[in-house]
Amino acid sequence: MGLFNSRKTIYVDSDVLVIGGGFGGCGAAYESRHWGRDLKVVVVEKANIERSGAVAQGLYAINCYMGMQWDENKPEDHVRYARNDLMGLVREDLSYDIARHVDATVHMFEEWGLPFMKDPETGRYQREGKWQIMIHGESYKPIIAEAARKAATKVYNRIMVTHLLMDKKKPNRVAGAVGFNVRDGNFYVFRSKSVIVAAGGASHIFKPHSVGEGMGRTWYAPWSSASAYALPIQVGAKMTQMENRIVLTRFKDGYGPVGAYFLHLKTTTENAYGENYEPTWYDSIKEMVGDYVDHQPVPTCLRNHAFLQEVKAGRGPIRMVTKEAFKDPHKETVGWENFLGMTIGQAVVWASQNIDPKEINPELVMSEPYVMGSHATCSGAWASGPEDYAPDDYQWGYNRMMTVEGLFGAGDTIGGTAHKFSSGSFTEGRIAGKAAVKYVTDLGSDQPQVDEAEYENLKSVVYQPMENYEVGRNEIVAGTVSPSYLLPLHGLQRLEKIMDEYVGGTGTNYLTNEPMLTRGLELLSMLKEDLPYLGAESLHQLQRAWELQHRVITSECVAQHTLFRKETRWPGYYYRADHPKLDDTNWHCFTLSSYDAKSGEWEMEKAPVHHIID
Ligand SMILES: Cc1cc2nc3c(=O)[nH]c(=O)nc-3n(C[C@H](O)[C@H](O)[C@H](O)COP(=O)(O)OP(=O)(O)OC[C@H]3O[C@@H](n4cnc5c(N)ncnc54)[C@H](O)[C@@H]3O)c2cc1C
């Protein structure tokens, strides 16, 4: 019996369990209640849904809105746009499904009190770009959270979910989840007929530009710790496109967004000598990817590539030309408000570095890679598609159900569907919620059961880092390095170094190859061997320990996928130096992986990309 087995166990029963109360999770809770009036809908969140997830600080634009009421765009147009940006590879059934429902979601947001900017002439939502509409979004998250709170039977804040529970009778069916309260340390066993994972994407699996005390300053929220992927991976759910990591152009040091600058302020970029550098790289990009370079808009990764090549050629830094735009008082206001509504840190960085964008064109930088499924890339779980639209081999059950029965996902969790952003993630949560309710209703008396032995065992596993610390700290006379345990921060730094140096981080200019990936995987497996020796001195550190566990298994998945895809499909996101060109003949396909937790083995396969829309 371990020191921490005396922690209280709290049991919670539900019909629909939503893990993560961000945009996907709030949408899932809202819609589950709509279709399942009498069902028990529970949300479990490691922070507090009021201000959790990627939208915690607010946003300045809703990036996915068709505008069908004004004939601005059709859902098919959005699928074409996302497909083009992803160099041909998206799940068109899933993307279309979101696009056809997303406007209704946005209209609800307005009814709930989210302030939208309106075009004074037309009265329509103020467009920032073809797909983006502008909002006063500092309170975006609390407004959306309120709807979820009212819909859910109960929201459990401050509980970090560590593992999913499987059904005692059917090996491939989910039955709930376990986690611990990060404040009082109690152990939670959630028994549920269905589970929707909406736990956000992954930052800090690659080494960030910011180090030391600035390490928390990353583009993607530092608390997005890959649970969305690790939870399904651990129970054998198939994952897709995990190699498709995102790298973004952002303002240097503060990671301030550039969308409003390009789209609304109409600013451009230039190299250190004031030249437009993108045309310089046209021929060499064409050589690598063929006609994709001629597509409009030019895919994000290719623009990244031109930026990176220009810097490598010694003509950096690349700057955003703001001096002109900031002469216009309206644009100047938008430029600053854009940060104040969602990335206050960028305004602070500029102030601290004497950068007035009216006087100085600020530097841009290419971020470290992140893994996510709702922004401009599409890593995530392989999910069943909509009944009325998905081709047969994309359909094996309920909409958004993974390859594990009863396990659904939304937002960053679901793969193959880039460009859903906040509104699309909420919409996908709604789609998953509706499907989960149907699944639960159809279950009848055939209901999943958790295995007591399984969750009791997990209870000791979950608190093991605290026990390791309690016992091992006696061996330390000074400092933090112990012969018998590894602190979560040290483990994280080791992970980031491996990913950076072997799997295509900034340290190698996003470059990798088969020998590097093979060595990276060896080092990751050595790191995995050490994880049972993590030491946590507090509940806060225990959370860090489990976040690290989730990041490591996700990183392994990313490395396996990167090794499997033998081409450079997205130059500017990463490069397979041993396969430097895009290869549509062999790789116009999805990559799928499944992990066997018992053997530690990964199985990789290809799945066809069906083009449903012309
Ligand atoms: C920097 C940045 C800027 C963006 N800008 C825009 C924009 O301008 N416009 C736009 O429309 N979209 C924008 N997006 C995209 C949008 O934020 C995401 O698409 C959306 O938040 C994804 O929803 P999600 O539910 O998957 O993840 P999130 O909203 O991040 O929610 C995940 C939730 O899961 C919780 N969680 C994680 N792990 C666990 C665990 N183990 N146990 C319990 N809970 C857990 C988290 O605390 C969090 O609350 C931006 C994203 C980022 C990162």
Image: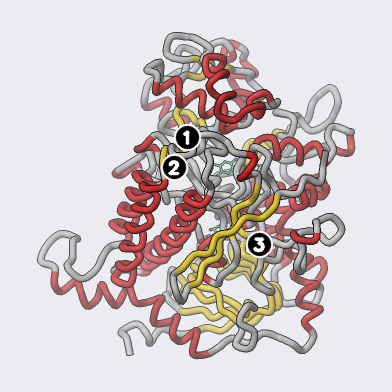
Residue 282 percent coordinates (x, y): 57, 19
Residue 446 percent coordinates (x, y): 74, 87
Q: Is residue 315 left or right of residue 188?
A: left
Disc 2 within 8 angstroms of ligand 1 (CB): no
Question: How many marks do you count on the picture?
Answer: 3
Q: Of discs 2 and 3, which sits in the foreground?
A: 3
As measured in the structure, the alpha-carbon distance from the residue carrying label 2 to the one carrying label 3 is: 25 Å
Residue 533 percent coordinates (x, y): 29, 71
Q: Residues within 10 Å of mark 2 (few under 14, many from 20)?
A: many
Q: Do the residues bearing badges 2 and 3 touch, measured as CB atoms within 8 Å?
A: no
Task: Give the residue number, with chain letter if any, for mark 1.
Answer: 255
Disc 2 is placed on an element classified as loop
Residue at figure coordinates x 69%, y 46% from the top left? 90
As measured in the structure, the alpha-carbon distance from the residue carrying label 3 to the one carrying label 1 is: 28 Å
Q: Which mark is residue 218?
A: 2
Disc 1 within 8 angstroms of ligand 1 (CB): yes
